[in-house]
Amino acid sequence: MKIILQYFKSFSGLSKEVWWLGFITLINRSGAMVIPFLSLYLTDSLDFSLQQAGWVMTSYGLGSFLGAWLGGKLCDQIGYYKVILLSLLLTGVSFIIIQYFTSFWSICISFFFLIAIADMARPAFFVALSAYSKPENKTRSLTFIRLAINLGFSAGPAIGGIIIASIGYYGLFWVDGITCIIAGIVMTQTLHPKKAKILDKEVIVDNPTEAHKDGIYILFLIALALFGFIFVQYFSTIPLYYKEIHHLSEQKIGLLLALNGALIFFTEMPLIAYLEKTKVSKISNVIWGFALTGISFILFLLTPWAGILIIGMVIATFGEMVAFPFGNAFALDRSKKGKQGAYMGLYTMAFSVSHIFGHNSGMQLINNFGYDFTWILMFLISVLGIFLLYIVKRKSEPKTIVN
């Protein structure tokens, strides 16, 4: 009983607007079924080679990069509310249309524009969250939105596997499209940008720092891009590994991916609430999260036992739960030095770079060198990222003077 009360206590203090933002995110992400199954859709349904699937993933990443940059710019010009609403509605229509493209080049181009439109909303969501939440609740508010995202992702892949088995891949596009449109409609009825003025009490600086000139922040983003590089493997090469090496069905793969969201739903908010009370810095928590995710790849090399897939997913999920909320919080804190849209645009662009290079590189690596070599390389990349974050920690945290 005490555990249950502690769980619900971790949600206390969040504003009504943050709850609505989480609900909108939940609706949107519950329909996000295409992306986790994209590599399987390309290779199974469209008979693309691994190299072709890798290039589609690259076009996905390029679109994400453009969308993040454009979203950050538009957010500072027209406001986060309009950017999010426009992105949700146009993404819904795009998902419905994109299912009718089947050739290699049409898929590359259409996914480029689809993800560019979808990811315009990412920096805007961060700015909205900063505006709708009190300064002392920002990390938990970020965690709450991630909870909504992963609850949606938990349901999405599980339902997606059933949809594929019963009516085929095309059903995923319809569900994705309709849920995006519904999320946009709910937003118009529940949130209003004027509400943010009441909650956002933070001081705006007179001479804002240009985001791209903030050296410590750029180094932090490079490390986050490396983290994203290895993390995206869980949505591209690792599902293929599940199927080709361990011979799991789409439904079992969906359930394994759903385990990620389920763990986050039940443990992330209490975990972040606990970690916030410790003296461990945001960057230190990101380092620990990065380390756990890197270790999860080494586990695949230890045994052919299928149970190691569950253990690996659990460890990677805990790494994600620690790294992402505190990484987001560090970026938002840093964004107080300048225009938030530009700062958070660069933040989301860092993960877009991961999509550009991560999916394709992973596909090419397993095609040319096999899975074992790929997993070792992912672990080594995590070591490099941790080293860069350690430099950020040294440069950004105040030095303790010993008498």
Image: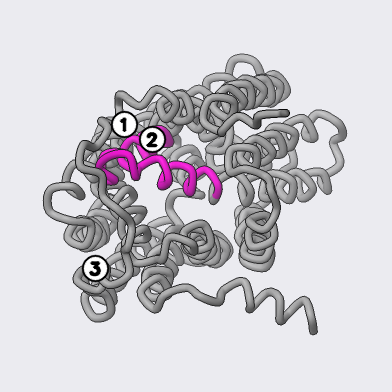
Q: Which residue is mark 2?
A: 352
> Residue sitting at 23 percent across and 57 percent down?
80
> Residue sitting at 56 percent across and 33 percent down?
397
Q: Which residue is mark 3?
A: 197
| Type of amino acid at the residue the image marks with label 3 | Lys
Residue 296 on image: x %, y %: 73, 37
Quadrant, the N terminus: bottom right
User: Residue furthest toward the bottom?
Assistant: 1
Q: Main secondary structure of the magenta part?
A: helix
Q: Is residue 251 visible?
A: no
Query: Alpha carbon of mark 1 to alpha carbon of mark 3: how far?
Result: 34 Å
Residue 159, compared with residue 43, is above or below; it is below
Residue 24, compared with residue 303, is above or below; it is below
Q: Which range of residues does the magenta coloring cover? A: 326-352
Query: Which numbered dot is residue 218?
Result: none
Q: Residues within 10 Å of mark 2 (few under 14, many from 20)?
A: many
- Name the image quarter holding residue 384: top right
Q: Is residue 34 visible?
A: yes
N-terminal of the pair, mark 1 or mark 2, is 1
- The secondary structure type at the circle numbered 3 is helix
Between marks 3 and 2 in the image, the one whose residue lies nearer the viewer = 3
Query: Alpha carbon of mark 1 to alpha carbon of mark 2: how far?
Result: 7 Å
Residue 208 on image: x %, y %: 24, 37
Side of 102 where 32 appears, left or right? right
Q: Which residue is mark 1?
A: 62
Contact (Cβ within 8 Å) of mark 1 with mark 2: yes
